[in-house]
Image (tube, grey):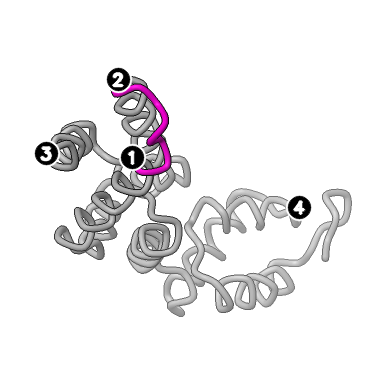
């Protein structure tokens, strides 16, 4: 790999980035950062990004879809946390919306309901208000919407 002090030619960088993008989907910001770490200038970076897009190694819409679907299914993240993470990666709002379409609403609510039930059960020795607050805090931290959490807590109480 190249250090910050040494620089790569644009062609060397392109070959490295083809591999970097082919074994895992990447967002534009990550690829730009990687190119700058090779010591390339802005014009070269922009040109290489365009080339990667043209050759379909880099596709931010595809990245957003895989990111949203993967983090929901694997880590059980809620929509708020996924949106925040995608914004941190400088993904466009359009692509964020496309990515969120990967999450089935019924499946999303079922996962949230299971998380609420598990957390609620794990807090069985707590007082009611503490149990409710801790369950709420846990799911908010996972990125779920407060209205959904409140509705599911009400459902579990009855």
Say which of marks 4 and 2 sits in front: 2
Q: Is residue 85 left or right of residue 9?
A: left
| Cα–Cα span, label 4 and label 3 | 61 Å
Q: Earlier in the sequence, mark 1 or mark 3?
A: 1
What secondary structure is marked by label 2?
A: helix
Where does the magenta region start and end? 120-128
* Image quarter of the C terminus: top left
Distance between mark 2 and mark 3 Cα atoms = 15 Å
Q: Which mark is residue 120?
A: 1
Which residue in the structure is indicated by mark 4?
Answer: 39
Question: Mark 1 to mark 3: distance in Å?
Answer: 13 Å
Q: Position of residue 80 (x, y in %)?
A: 31, 40
In the image, what residue occupies the spot 33% across and 64% down? Answer: 65
In the rendered structure, the answer to whether residue 4 lies left or right of residue 122 reads right
Q: Is residue 148 above or below residue 35?
A: above
Give the distance between the C-alpha atoms of the residues marked 2 and 1, in whole angstroms.
11 Å
- Lower sequence index among marks 4 and 3: 4
Which quadrant of the figure contains the N terminus? bottom right
- Relative to the observer, which residue lies in front, 70 or 47? 70
Q: Earlier in the sequence, mark 1 or mark 4?
A: 4
């Amino acid at each position: 790999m190249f250090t910050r002090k040494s620089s790569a030619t644009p062609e060397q960088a392109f070959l490295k980035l083809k591999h970097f993008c082919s074994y895992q989907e990447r967002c534009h910001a990550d690829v730009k950062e990687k190119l700058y770490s090779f010591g390339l200038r802005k014009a070269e970076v922009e040109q290489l990004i365009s080339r990667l897009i043209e050759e379909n190694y880099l596709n931010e819409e595809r990245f957003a879809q895989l990111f949203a679907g993967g983090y929901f299914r694997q880590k059980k993240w809620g929509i708020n946390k996924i949106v925040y993470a995608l914004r941190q990666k400088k993904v466009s709002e359009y692509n964020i919306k496309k990515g969120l379409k990967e999450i089935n609403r019924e499946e999303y609510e079922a996962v949230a309901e299971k998380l609420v039930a598990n957390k609620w059960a794990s807090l069985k020795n707590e007082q009611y208000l503490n149990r409710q607050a801790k369950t709420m805090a846990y799911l908010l931290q996972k990125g779920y919407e407060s209205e959904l959490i409140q509705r599911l807590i009400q459902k579990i109480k009855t």
